Amino acid sequence: MLNELREPRGKWVNYEPEGNEIVIGLRGGAVFWFPVEIAQGIAGAEPEVLALVELTSAGDGLRWDVLDADLSVPMLLAGRFGSREWMERLVAV
């Protein structure tokens, strides 16, 4: 419960094919979205697979079983879309 007070949590998540984006509705009412191509583990995935995104029961993570990919909601909101190496490659582009 303490982490729920300190860290943002998702209430819902969707894949939006028009912009190729993941959209997360946060419990506080804000909405956050990011382009699929900047996120490690899901970049390059097909729209049908991206649409299978699930929010963890605690609301602190996103999960794609088919891709065996997980992303942390607090880390995404902090601008961290993958490992250190992944982020270094993103910045270098």
Image (cartoon, rainbow, N blue to C red):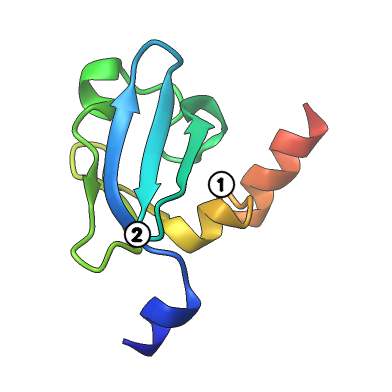
Q: Which residue is mark 2?
A: 27
Return the residue nearer the eye: 21 or 83.
21
Image location (x, y in percent) of residue 64: 25, 42
Q: Position of residue 76 (x, y in %)?
A: 53, 52
The N terminus: image quadrant? bottom left
Where is residue 61 shown, x and y percent of the image?
A: 34, 58
* Disc nearest the viewer among 1 and 2: 2
For the C terminus, the image quarter is top right
Q: Position of residue 73 (x, y in %)?
A: 43, 57
View extreme (right): residue = 92
* Camera-side residue of 12 and 62: 12
> How many marks overall?
2
Left or right side of 47 for 79: right
Secondary structure under tag 2 reads loop
Q: What residue did someone put label 1 on?
A: 81
Q: Residue furthest front?
A: 29
> What is the spatial separation of the Cα atoms under label 1 and label 2, in whole angstroms?
21 Å
Dot 1 alpha-carbon crowd within 10 angstroms: few under 14, some 14 to 19, many 20 or more: many
Dot 1 lies on which element? Answer: loop
The residue at the far top in this view is 18
- Callout 1–callout 2 Cβ contact below 8 Å: no
Q: Quadrant of residue 65?
A: top left
Which residue is rendered at x = 45% and y = 65% of the image?
A: 8
Residue at 32% from the left image edge and 50% from the top image edge: 62
Residue type at mark 1 is Phe
Question: Which amino acid, mark 2?
Answer: Arg
Residue 86 in the image: above or below residue 60: above
